[in-house]
Image (cartoon, grey):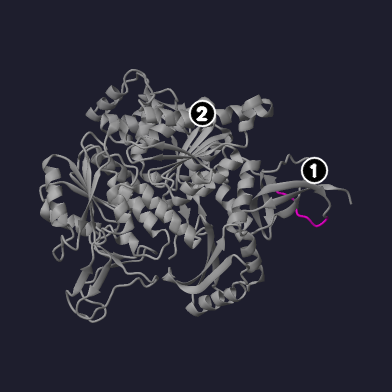
Amino acid sequence: MGSQRIADVLMPLALDTAYSYAAASGMALAEGDVVQVPLGTREAIGVVWSLREGTGSNLKSITGVIDAPPLGPKLRRLVDWIAWYTLAPKGSALALVLRVPEPGRAEPMRVAVRATGQPPKRLTPARGRVLAASQGGLLHVKRDLAQAAGVGVGVVDALIDEGVLETVALPPEAVAERPDPDHARASLSADQRQAATLLAAAVTTTAIAHAQGPQAGALAGAVGKAPVILLDGVTGSGKTEVYFEAVAAALRQDVQALILMPEIALTAQFLDRFAHRFGVRPALWHSGIGARKRERLYDGVASGEVKVIAGARSALFLPFSRLGLIVVDEEHEAAYKQEDGLCYHGRDLAVVRGRIEDCPVILASATPSIETRVNVDRGRYKRVALPERYGGRNLPQIVAVDLKRDAVPPGRWLSETLRWAIAETLAAGEQVLLFLNRRGYAPLTLCRACGHRYECPNCSAWLVEHRFRRALVCHHCGHTERRPAVCVECGTVDSLASCGPGVERIAEEVAALFSDKRSIVLSSDFPGGAERLRQELKGITEGAFDIVIGTQLVAKGHNLPQLTLVGVLDADIGLTSGDPRAAERTFQLLQQVTGRAGRGARPGRALVQTYQPEHPVMAALLSGDAERFYAEETRAREMAGLPPFGRLAALIVSANDRADAEAHGRALALEACPPEGVMVLGPAEAPLALVRGRHRFRLLVKTEREVDLQAYLRAWLARAPKPRGSVKVAIDVDPQSFL
């Protein structure tokens, strides 16, 4: 039998191998093409991972080629790297990247209307307003014309039916407008200008070298050496304006830029600042974008039409045709870690994609992660510093309120010191931010009569009271139930007690103390969705509220020029966990939230309520000596062999039955056989032992930095028993959470 073309097709399923199919003679096919193939009794979508000549009489044939952007070699390399690093099946990694248009979904026709000059058969006041609004022969979108005239769309439709208005087909709307790098150049300080010049030069040099190819002389040496740069600037130093100049450099070189953000749905201020600098907003990519818009953006990125994307971590998997810059804003944020399904860290994956694409990566933060700082010390990353706030403004004065001395009355949460400071600030016409990293009204509800505590039936977690919603809610699985008037355990009436504060409870106290002031509560379960939240944040910026009460949602990225006082109500929350990153995260969060104060013309201050003012985190925060904290925390990590000086991986065994999960965890441990430089701990029941009805046990692998962790894990899992029944094993390389 003669030779034929064989395509190895990878499908976006939990499969680690590509399946071989015969390519019909004359079929135009290339590696990376999206194809339709038979799989069992159904048709499936896959990607041609490789093409070769061979023989195979029993091979099924490719059914057809899908009209979708092919996956280029760099994106396929990224898929291969993700599968290798995370130990996920290669098909699961492909599922992150591949997007196929829904069949039959046509682009909706855009229609406008305009006046024909013909009078209506009957002129009513409503029709008269429509005719007045449509004068001049201009085109109007039907809905906009009705809104301008103050009538319903039916009035416009009736005028179309009579021939008074005519419809005109409009060309398809551009998926994204092109930003203008010279629209409004920013006024930068000397430090900002120097930093911006360095970042822009990195983008320009790499882009020119790629454009001219390997014969580009001295510039050709830049290919393969695009830097990773830490943009390390204190809060209010203007990091965004600085990296915008790198984006401008990318636009001038006609290459694409990706800006990753931890809270993309909440970035109204960022979008406004981008539009002010470049004339238009960037294209947005996040889970809230509609399916058709996502398809058009995907195609626009692949064709090169879309030049700048601002997105959540999933934007890393878009098929950029010529990616010239990646920016990771707030690079230290834990939100970049994907912990469900295939586990990866967006910041680290951005660095990998930058290496593959050979484009600069900018990591921006006022409180960089220890991993990033160590990479700077080792020479792997460069560092550009902005040590002062823009305009010479001072950083806020931070003072501790020792709750052991300044005791808060029972049932109250604001110390007398903080209450006086709030009153003083409000009297001066300035804004106050009260920060508590707890959603809802109270983290625990119990019965005073029998002691019954209200717990989630699906998770080993207390139900959080949300008084505004009159509900008890699990923040892990979303289980919700009404807050009962009678104890479900003992039947006692009106015996339930709310224990501890959440932001809603703080709002209640604020309303009692400052009844004449306007306050607002902001948290991730804010009613009305992201659009309403954007509007409220805009209102805060414009001074519509005097007191803002919020969780970590308000701790990052927001520039509130009238805010001069930040009150941190329970600064010790993050220090009580067994997480090895607890001190670092607490310091970062408190540094970020106190940094919201004094960003306008007036100086700022922060009062931090704590029972541990002597704790190293608090001492560093109060003294402003961040370098000392980082040095001590880095030294402690190094002595313990923790990342980035050692490596960690977690194996989470879960099952519907607790005994099954524990048994499989023990069976895994028996096959661990750790070599020198590797330590395996567990199995131990997870701190959150029950999540969404599944019982969880954890094993932790700790290795020296030089150990090939992935090779060890693969060998271990190959000899270990395979999960049966409801048992599942999830692998998290470089875990960020230990719950």
Which mark is first along the chain, 1 or 2? 1
Q: Is residue 9 left or right of residue 329?
A: right
Element at badge 2?
helix
Q: Which residue is mark 2?
A: 201
Magenta range: 57-63
> Is label 1 in a helix, a strand or a loop?
loop
Residue 441 appears in the rendering: yes
**Residue at image location 48% in from the left, 51% down from the top:** 371
Q: CA distance from mark 2 to mark 1?
A: 49 Å
Residue type of the residue flagged with mark 1:
Ser
Residue at 37% of width from left, 52% of height from top? 629
- Tell which residue pokes out farthest to the right in this image: 1
Q: Nearer the viewer, residue 23 or 9?
A: 9
Q: Residue at x 34, y 53 (%)?
A: 587
Instruction: Point out residue 428 in the picture as x, y percentages from the top left corner.
Output: 12, 40
Q: Residues within 10 Å of mark 1 (few under 14, many from 20)?
A: few
Residue 649: image location, x then y, percent? 54, 62
- As drawn, is 277 to the left or to the right of 671? left
Residue under label 1: 25
Apparent side of residue 646 relative to residue 499 in the rendered image (left or right): right
Give the quarter of the image for residue 386. top left
> Is residue 44 positioned above or below 256 on the image?
below
- Where's residue 592, x and y in %? 33, 47
Give coordinates of residue 465: x percent, y percent: 26, 64
Residue 172 shows up from this direction: no
What's the residue type where badge 2 is placed?
Ala
Is residue 313 or residue 376 the one in the foreground? 376
Question: What is the magenta segment's predominant secondary structure?
Answer: loop
Residue at 62%, 30% in the rendered image: 210
